[in-house]
Image (cartoon, coloured by chain):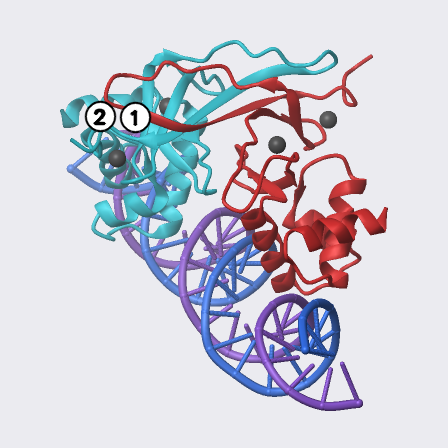
Chain colours: A red, B cyan, C purple, D blue
Amino acid sequence: MDEAITDILKHNQLSVTDNRLKILELFHNNNKALSHADIEHLSGKNFDRVTIYRTLQTFVEKGIIHTIPTADNSIVYALCKEDCGEGHHHDDHVHFICDKCGTTYCLEQTSIPSINIPKGFSAHRVNVLVNGVCKNCRPS
Amino acid sequence: MDEAITDILKHNQLSVTDNRLKILELFHNNNKALSHADIEHLSGKNFDRVTIYRTLQTFVEKGIIHTIPTADNSIVYALCKEDCGEGHHHDDHVHFICDKCGTTYCLEQTSIPSINIPKGFSAHRVNVLVNGVCKNCRPS
DNA sequence: ACTTGTTTGCAACATCGTTGCAAAATTATT
DNA sequence: AATAATTTTGCAACGATGTTGCAAACAAGT
Ligand SMILES: [Mn+2]
Ligand SMILES: [Mn+2]
Ligand SMILES: [Zn+2]
Ligand SMILES: [Zn+2]
């Protein structure tokens, strides 16, 4: 498992450091989007804030993780599927934010519908954010 | 014109102050979404930062303006055209952000498509953000 | 083991947003 | 119109978030 994570770094021409291994591991273990603050807490506050910022930025640039905008103006990050690379992001799926627990999910299987925008505008990328209640928080 | 803006405030049980008139006027004159920083600049830096924050918050609560999340993690605000009220927002239209000039538009005529989310999840609100090039920035 | 280039942690700084409180402005009442 | 009650404003102080420069620590290639 740790070996697989090491490989991800190597395949992206990144030095293998404790910091990067630990952060990447957090994304693999928690199957949800993580914020900078989440990582700071989950890592036991061992890493410097600045290092986390720089690591996340590096991972985004390499196509290892992608950013998700949220209505409350905080960035969260989630693992990309295979076909993203340096400068190439193809995370064309819907994102779901639970209003109860705050968890952000990548709905990989839910694709983005096509949007008819007015004449004169040209679309390059579409983000769909769904707010609601997730399956864990659903009242039974 | 100024009279109409005064009425909006009165209809929402808000005191009519220079500050609120000026900010509301900015939204009516510029037909696009404005950020806190935009308002600070457009108003000639006459109003205190804090007052602008509080005014925007009040307007959102009253259903006069709505917030728009953006991919670069900054909030912009735009007038509610539909009949939004205190606690009731119905701004179900697509938002377009121009990557060239940074302008955010409300595409009032472009409605939100229905999204099929997985079983167990329940959707309350959907935000659709389209990034691209707007009609003003289009290469001719 | 040594060298080279990269990464980290720290400090210092900048920006953004919030809160408490007294002064000022607005609205309600006499 | 004058006064009282309420609301809003501006300031100061603070906290949270994000950025940059730089020297020490580290990882990778020889
Ligand atoms: Mn995603
Ligand atoms: Mn809008
Ligand atoms: Zn939930
Ligand atoms: Zn434009």
C-alpha separation, residue under disc 2 versus residue under disc 1: 7 Å
- Quick one: quadrant of the C terminus of chain A? top right
**Helix, strand or loop at mark 1:** helix
Q: Is residue A98 above or below residue A18?
A: above
Element at badge 2?
A: helix
Looking at this view, name the residue that lies furthest to the right: A1
Q: Residues within 10 Å of mark 1 (few under 14, many from 20)?
A: some
Residue B9 marker: 1
Mark 2 lies within 8 Å of ligand 2 (Cβ measured) = no
The residue singled out by tag 2 in the image is B5
Q: Position of residue A106 (x, y in %)?
A: 65, 28
Marks 2 and 1 on same chain? yes
**Image label count:** 2
Name the spot of residue B68 as percent of width and height, x first.
43, 30
- Residue name at image x 37 percent, y 33 percent: B77
Q: Which residue is painted at 77% across and 41% down in the image?
A: A28
Q: Quadrant of ligand 1?
A: top right
Q: Residue at x 49, y 23 (%)?
A: B127
Q: Are marks 2 and 1 in contact (CB under 8 Å)?
A: yes
Identity, as a three-letter code, of the amino acid under mark 2: Ile
Above/below status of A6 relative to B39: below
In the drawing, what numbered circle is on residue A83?
Answer: none
* Res. D26 image quadrant: bottom right
> Callout 2 environment at 10 Å: few (<14), some (14 to 19), or many (20+)?
some
Please report, as a chain letter, where disc 1 is located. B
Q: Amino acid at mark 1?
A: Leu
Can residue B91 be seen in the rendering of this structure?
no
Q: Position of residue B6 (x, y in %)?
A: 22, 26
